[in-house]
Amino acid sequence: MRLKDKTAIVTGGASGFGAGIARKLAAEGARVMVADINAEAAHTIAHEIHGLAQHCDVGDAQSVDQMVEAALTSFDKLDILVNNAGVTHLPMMMEEVSEEDFDRVMRVNAKSVYLTARKIVPHMKANGAGAILNVASTAGVSPRPRLNWYNASKGWMITATKAMAIELAPFGVRVNAINPVAGETPLLKSFLGEDTPEVRAKFLATIPLGRFSQPEDMGAAAAFLCSDEAAMITGVAMEVDGGRCI
């Protein structure tokens, strides 16, 4: 119960890593809002963990504001924000990615961090405490060919994490990131291009521990970084990648 009496928002919390994080935070005692563009799936996870569900388009300012206001109405305070929602473009040469896909990746992976910070940081500053966790990627540390603009968006998120951490430290607000390797999530097929045993085997050969990231792996890392046990940790981008970036 490391997070007893804490409150949290997890964006993209209805599936994949986000659902794993939401489940773990709730298991550790937090009251969790599961925010997702898929409202039905958000309600399913929220019901499972006895939390709240909120429809949210993280790239839309009004939708983000409504999410935060709903959380504060229900919780009174907000201790933890997990910026997990993310998208990618299909693997292809950088010049072939459409402008529409580029804008979508940056809107969800980068702009969302700005929008949530704009709304939540003043509240955390006023409380003199808070933990923000950005779910970045090993792609931001060790970029893969044909995912150029996705790589760049996650590199942006890692730099934003460090910049936020140094600015918010005097106010008692910690900001960290986790860098998953590809995992058993709805985005896996998009990362691989095609999900076949041969393609999986080739990718797994690059991970020393020999398996994909699981939602439970991200939940465990998130729960630690968002807890008081990590009170002296801010500005890190923790690789949860089975050794891929070594």
Image (tube, rainbow, N blue to C red):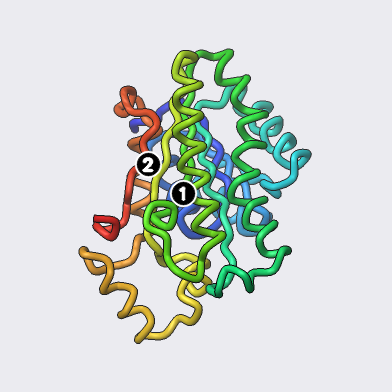
Q: Quadrant of the C terminus?
A: bottom left
Q: Please provide percent x and percent y for residue 204.
A: 30, 72
Would you place residue 16 above or below residue 135 in this image?
below
Q: Determine the residue positioned at 56% across, 48% down.
A: 46
Would you place residue 161 above or below residue 85 in this image?
above
As drawn, the label of residue 136 is 1
Q: Mark 1 is on which residue type? A: Ala
Left or right of 181? Residue 80 is: right
Q: Mark 2 is on which residue type? A: Ala
Left or right of 240? Residue 103 is: right
Crowding near the residue tagged with mark 1, few <14, some 14–19, many ≥20 C-alpha atoms within 10 Å: many
For mark 1, give the secondary structure: loop
Instruction: Give how far apart the Cα atoms at labels 1 and 2 are.
Output: 8 Å
Residue in the foreground of this view, choosing between 110 and 14: 110
Dividing the picture into quarters, in which one does residue 206 lie?
bottom left
Residue hosting label 2: 237
Q: Earlier in the sequence, mark 1 or mark 2?
A: 1
Q: Quadrant of the N terminus?
A: top left
Q: Determine the residue positioned at 70% across, 33% down.
A: 70
Q: Please provide percent x and percent y for residue 67.
A: 69, 38
Left or right of 17? Residue 236 is: left
Residue in the foreground of this view, choosing between 124 and 158: 158
